[in-house]
Amino acid sequence: MALKTLHTLVCAAVLVAVPASAQVKKKDKLPEQNSEQDKYYQREVIPLPKGEVLELGSIALMPDKVIAVGTRRGEIWTCKGAYDDDLTKVQWQKAFSGAHEPLGMFFKDGWLHITDRDAYGRLRDNDGDGRFDEYQVLSNNWGINGDYHEFSFGSTPDKNGDVWIVHCLTGSSKANSQWCGWAQRVTPEGGSTEVCSGIRSPGGIGFNVEGDAFYTDNQGNWNGTSCIKHLKPGSFTGNPTGNIFYKDAPHMGPRPEDPVSGSRIVTEAERIPEYVPPAVQIPHGKVGQSPTALITDKTDGKFGPFKNQLLVGEQTHSQVQRAYLEQVNGIYQGAVWKFLDGFDCGIVPMRLADDGTLFVGGTNRGWASIGPKNFSLERVRWKGVTPFSMLTMEAEKDGFTFTFTEALDADIAADVENYKATAWTYIYQKTYGSPEVDKVTPKVVSVEVAKDKKSVRVVLDKLTKGHVHHLDCSALRSEKGNPLWHPNSYYTLNEIPK
């Protein structure tokens, strides 16, 4: 572990405030809402300063209901009024210029911490004018060159105050700079250590409610589909390209064996002790295909009924997905559902405030998306109306138990014909992505509805270890006769409970 010297820079000369004329007028119309989603969640566009290009890569929540955003052009802007009812009155100020594509940001103890391509550091406003005039580098011991894909995503602090950083491969397929394809942990004092290898092309990093670190990795080489992966200290997460740096990380032990191209994840996980399989595989195209931000809903119900679950940004589909995790036989696994959609741009950063306001940032440069705009900032709030939805999906030794947000129509829920199950896996290979392979069609043999009608145990004739199990529950209805919101669940079965 090497401690980094702190460097202080004066940055006031490049800082300007946005004039009042740059604020958006009331005539600017917000987009129409998704009709079903709008029953439960309010999505609103936060106007950006006129004439400016704010391709958002990071968001931080600051004191006094101020938010900060970092842009891919290296600027940091602050916004007042983003929580207010009237968003036409938001006020923007450019607070810093000269960062290098920050893709991680948070505020703590008077400092705005940023992770960008070449450093993890912090900024401070010393004279109270709203502009950052001091910059300290805390860690920069990784390599960098001019490659477009050498992104570095930084987390908020973990329970020890450390920041976790994941480094993308060069071109998402090579390791031409030091620590490409690795995760590092940086202490508040700037000490840096390598914690995991095997990363390909991350889109975000965060922690579950227990405080364990996870990141999103995109489909590509050694990733049959996009996934959520557990950053278990000392582990290998699947892509061997960056493993050339094990020689520089003696504390990690010997280099793991390389996976066999054309194999399966379940086979290689049994063969390579260091390999931790993806906690959730996100079916390509069916759910999403470019996962990004990863945050946990810790608002205790202020954002709806899905507290303590993961919210996952989606760049290509301009959506937010939802994931439920559990540990089985010491390995993380779980289910993913579609959740929120209709955003103006491909999502990269997200932050969820304690009051239940979800801030979502977008950028399309280099990554096409369904959302038509090149950049955006939006917010989402729960309206207090609970959707009839799957709440959790947990693995059993012979099937799955589902819980729901409302009581079920028990007669419909008890009918085995109202559940459709399929399962498949992906080729674990060096080439880009994979089709769905080794498909099976499990038969639903029995269903047990709980007395409170809020859960069902679905027994299948066969579970397949390592497969994604898809359950289509579209036929179910609530006691009130309502259909399920997002009735398709996808569970990655790394382990079958004993």
Image (cartoon, helix red, strand yellow):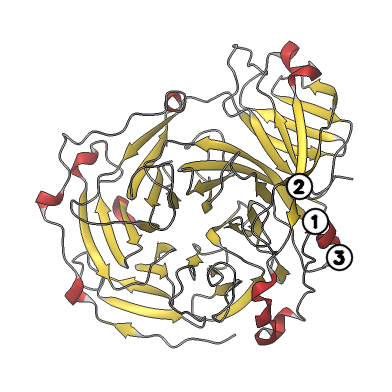
Mark in front: 3 vs 1: 1
User: What secondary structure is marked by label 1?
Assistant: strand
Disc 2: which residue: 425
Mark 1 neighbour density, 10 Å: few (under 14) some (14–19) many (20 or more): some
Count of marks, rendered view: 3
Q: Quadrant of the C terminus?
A: top right
Kindly check if marks 1 and 2 are in contact, taking CB atoms under 8 A apart as contact.
yes
Residue ID at (42%, 48%): 346
Residue ID at (34%, 67%): 110
Mark in front: 3 vs 2: 2
Kindly check if marks 3 and 1 are in contact, taking CB atoms under 8 A apart as contact.
no
Residue 315, numbered circle: none
Residue type at mark 3: give it: Arg
Which of pointers 3 and 1 lies earlier in the amino acid sequence? Answer: 1
- Give x and y (percent) for residue 254: 77, 81
- Give x and y (percent) for residue 466: 80, 49
Disc 1: which residue: 264
Residue ID at (38%, 46%): 345
User: What secondary structure is marked by label 2?
Assistant: strand
Mark 2 neighbour density, 10 Å: few (under 14) some (14–19) many (20 or more): many
Q: Is residue 257 or residue 322 the one in the foreground?
A: 257
Disc 3: which residue: 271
Residue 104 is left or right of residue 373, and the answer is right
Residue type at mark 2: give it: Thr
User: What secondary structure is marked by label 3?
Assistant: helix
Residue type at mark 1: give it: Arg
Q: Is residue 394 or residue 174 the one in the foreground?
A: 174
* Residue 350 in view in this figure: no
Which of pointers 3 and 2 lies earlier in the amino acid sequence? Answer: 3
